[in-house]
Amino acid sequence: MTNPLLDDFKNSSGIPPFEDIKTIHYKPAFLKAIKDHKNEIESIVNNNDKPNFFNTINSLENAGSLLSKVSRVFFNLLSADSSESLQNIANEITPLLSKHRDSISLNQRLFQRIKKVYESNEDLNEEQKRLVQITYDSFRLNGSDLKKTERSSLKKINQKLSSLTLKFGQNTLKETNEFSLIIEKQSDLKGLPKDLIAQAKIQAEKENLKNAWLFKATRENLYPFLTFSKNRILREKIYKGYVNKGKNSNSNNNEQILIEISSLREEKAKLLGFESHTELALQNTMAENKKNVLELLDNVWEPATNRAQEEIDEIQNLIQKEGNNFKLKPWDWWYYSEKVRKSKFDYSEEDMRPYLSLENIQKAAFTTAERLFDIKFKAMKKFPKYHEEIKAYKVLDNNNKIVGIFLTDYFARPSKQGGAWMTSYQDQSKNKGIKHPIVINVCNFPKPTKDKPTLLSFEQAITLFHEFGHGLHGLLSNVTYPSLSGTSVPRDYVEFPSQMMENWIRSPKVLKEFALHYKTGKKIPQDLLKKYENCQKFNQGFATTEYLAASYLDLAWHSNNRKIIDINKFEKKLFKSLKKPNEIDSRYGSTYFNHIFSGGYSSSYYSYMWSEVLDSSAFEVFEKKGLFHKSSGKKLKELVYSSGNSKNLMDQFIKFNGKKPDPKRLLQKRGLA
């Protein structure tokens, strides 16, 4: 059998030949790739020459390229276009991959070679020295220094964790797809935007529901429903459908899974000599330790909750004023805060939506990058794709030389995990021939209807720019070694380039140019733009509090020295100790917190706020010099987007910014100072 995964991807772009890849190809490809990688490692270990950078560290960088290629194709599709057959393969292959990774990271002979290179005085350039340091640290933190019996225990923990985290994510997706809010009476649609109603009708027809509208527990359905539905009972129903994911009494329940994940992570941390998983996870991050993380969170928590209490009082007064006597609940927040915003600023996000077509916002993102970084995006007509909705663009420099390939997969579907993310099919490197990056942005925007293109909420427009920022971080990478390429940076830095890009779509200047009415093509009216500017800092008490609550929850799960039995009690005790307002829930509950239990952000959810300190400080340069200031854009490209992890990240930031990041800028940006 010819297996396309084992061949070079010979099309001109290097995109995987998705149409040729069948389910039966994955397992044989994984087994062959694992075998090849083992042989490559053995070749390094059995080299009788004195260990040096090129025969050890560089050889290690070159090893495993086939496994990386197969893994990227498989796991990217598992997230973006999943199926039961792919999930079954994942359940089978994940423990094998965990075992294989351990066979490398716990290989004593390999580690001794790495250690000798680390301790040598070999004449290396700056990037090579950094790669040696990162490689050595990675092996040490993965248990290479442990005794034989401890290494054996660690292998068992790692294999178990890999299966549990995979299962957690699969359960969350199933729970999302299984919840249905079916509306059969037209009167129950009162207040909902026409676009949302049209989408609900399409969703119902797909499930053969006649004369009905179907709403799912996805954020794309949830937030507009909560914002505009006049039916409080239905608002509560869809809200609880969302927040109860993973805790329903069925086969998708995540409660015992996450308790076991937390316990195993703590066991692993202690085996490696750390007090908690948090202290282990924060090694080699910008924050460095839990104390510094908590200092940041605590400094923002008080002003955020103080502002949130003012917002609560304002909403509660409105509820009473309307003649209602119920107490504000979390599922009321979006509906009533929208009313408050409308009354205070005469502004609704729905007023903005007709000007925020997906086409307009993507054009704004591309043009921003072109002006800042001297690149251009050229649509590709023919290319391999795993779904008909995928689009592709060649990214070229100002000499028309290829920089990379940018793919987009923007629309929601049941086979796709919730949320939005960036990933890559190939990272940039120059170590073994020049490899250009192949990057993809995956989102869950509503599909266009017969009558309208996809019209984004402002939050969705920000999401597009955010993920595009991650994409640029991968696309503009210009380093030698793949381990230091693009987004291969600490968690609390990786969100900086993405959040930095958000500043441009928030800018009235960009909106004035690109927010065009989808029907008439007319620019957004000046009075609407002014209303938008006036309410930029509205509802920030709520937004900051719900985010911080999730960050504290993440740390609590991974800094606990006792076994947690009752998740509800655990959460309630934590939030009571924080004096979190009851009217505001954590952005994520434990049982569907994919970021930390299946997405690699354990003990790192704080990083969005840490990165916001960086981006709010760095954007000051453009506020002072101009939104598309050429030389500042060139410096941003060189010092942030292109350098990956090849240099000290704080040094790079200071070179660009001229000074250290200032936490006060974050409070000012959110209107909490």
Image: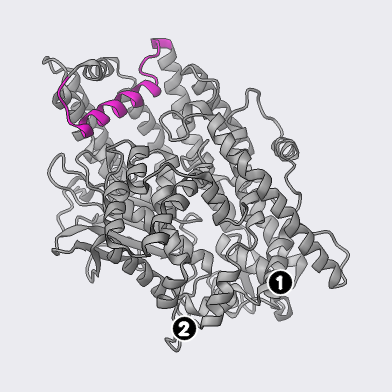
Q: Earlier in the sequence, mark 2 or mark 1?
A: 1
For the question of whether residue 252 can be seen, the reply is no
Q: Is residue 602 magenta?
A: no
For the residue marked with disc 2, what is the amino acid?
His
Q: Quadrant of residue 294?
A: top right
Residue at mark 2? 517
Magenta residues, start to end: 122-149
The single residue placed furthest to the bottom in the displayed view is 520
Q: Quadrant of residue 29?
A: top left
Q: Is residue 139 magenta?
A: yes
Cα distance between the residues tagged 2 and 1? 24 Å
For the residue marked with disc 1, what is the amino acid?
Lys
Horizontal side of residue 226 vs 621, given as left or right = right
**Colour scheme of the picture:** one colour
Q: Nearer the viewer, residue 34 or 60?
A: 60
Classify mark 1: residues with Cα within 10 Å, few (<14), some (14-19) or many (20+): some
**Mark sitting on residue 339:** 1
Mark 2 in CB contact with mark 1 (< 8 angstroms): no
